[in-house]
Image: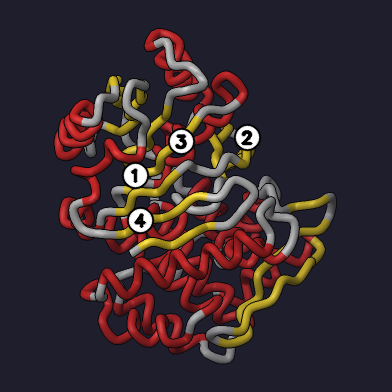
Amino acid sequence: MKIDIPVSQPYRVDIAPGLLDDLGRYVSSGTAALVVTEEHVAPLLLERACRALRAAGVRAVPAVLPAGEETKSLVQYATLLHKLAEAGLTRADTVVALGGGVIGDLAGFAAATWLRGIRLVQVPTTLLAMVDSSVGGKTAIDLPEGKNLVGAFHQPAAVVCDPQLLDTLPPAILRDGCAEALKTAVLFDPDLFSHLAARGTDFDRMTVLPRCVACKRDAVCADEFDRGTRQLLNLGHTAGHAIEALSGYRIAHGHAVAIGLAIMARAFCRDAAEIEAALIKLGLPTRTEFPPERLAQAALADKKRAGERITLVIPRAIGDCVLREVPVDTLADIFERGM
């Protein structure tokens, strides 16, 4: 299946089993590719990806980084820049992001800034990256002061989505991506919500993946640079990012977003019980031990904050969500209402 993303630099998301072995056709023969991955993915997929590139006449240079959110750092960003320099990558060459959201964000930011921007091919290996982070052109690294505070918009040249790669995922990582899929369903698609609520982690991949990508495409095309309605995609993320930070990133992104989604649903949504039940069906948490005051304080570093106000996504019903700007000093009360 092919889904065109007609943004300022158009590209296509290809979704089909076995696409990793055809990776070479997404990179021009006679060029080089820095294949960025992490230590858990590398033993499973790195040689396979490099072999596909070499078979197409591409010089494949591997770069294996530590796993985890901590990798989205200035230190590892510098590591990638040095790798790019050592490998002699030029503006004709490509960065291939082989991994989940962390690798996609970090490798994407390196591609956005190396020589003021070179080609990026996203090869998502997690459900979260397939349904969300690999599409839309957001790249970023974290600072100790907050998540995704340094970044750039840099659309990929292609997204190569191979559903068979989900077979390599531990159950907890699969569930992490289910949170973003369910978020998409709550925002845009009651039928997708019904499918996930009924099937749980036994969902149909070729139903869920294309539908989530299509929803993300529509949101990105309507607001490519995240100044308006694209911010709907942040449903559950203000509380979610706060939970991640307070846990020292021991709580994974999708699990934190699941809790954030549940908090906002209980605070505002007439379908809150159905949303919480679907999260539980997917094996995701719906509550946190962090008190609302600490969540609100942690959320002050959120990049969606503007002065003393912050934009929240309010779910009124499944398929009916709106943006609302609120004073930051009301956040604790909102979180308490949802807890």
Task: State which mark lies toward you, 2 or 3.
Answer: 3
Identify the residue position indicated by label 3 in the image. 120
Q: Identify the residue shown where x is 40% and y is 66%.
A: 179
Q: Does residue 255 appear in this view? A: no
Query: What separation in Å lies between label 2 and label 4 (alpha carbons)?
Result: 29 Å
Q: Nearer the viewer, residue 275 or 168?
A: 168
Residue positioned 40% across, 43% down in the render: 122
Task: Give yes or no for contact between labels 2 and 4 (Cβ–Cβ under 8 Å).
Answer: no
- What secondary structure is marked by label 2? strand
Q: Is residue 59 above or below residue 179?
A: above
> What's the CA distance linking mark 2 and mark 1?
22 Å
Residue farthest to the right, as pictured: 307
Q: Residue at x 32, y 27 (%)?
A: 29
Is label 2 or label 1 in front?
Answer: 1
Where residue 102 appears, as percent x and y from the top left, is: 42, 41
Q: Which residue is mark 1?
A: 123
Looking at the rendered image, the quarter that the C terminus falls into is bottom right
- Of badges 2 and 4, nearer the viewer stands 4
Which numbered disc flags the more N-terminal residue, 2 or 4? 4
Do the residues under discs 3 and 4 have CB atoms within 8 angstroms? no
Check disc 4 and report the residue beneath it.
14
In-image side of 203 versus 251 (left or right): left
Q: Amino acid at mark 4?
A: Asp
Give how far apart the Cα atoms at labels 3 and 4 are.
15 Å
Q: CA distance from mark 3 to mark 1?
A: 10 Å
**Residue of label 2:** 150
Q: Position of residue 209 (x, y in %)?
A: 35, 66
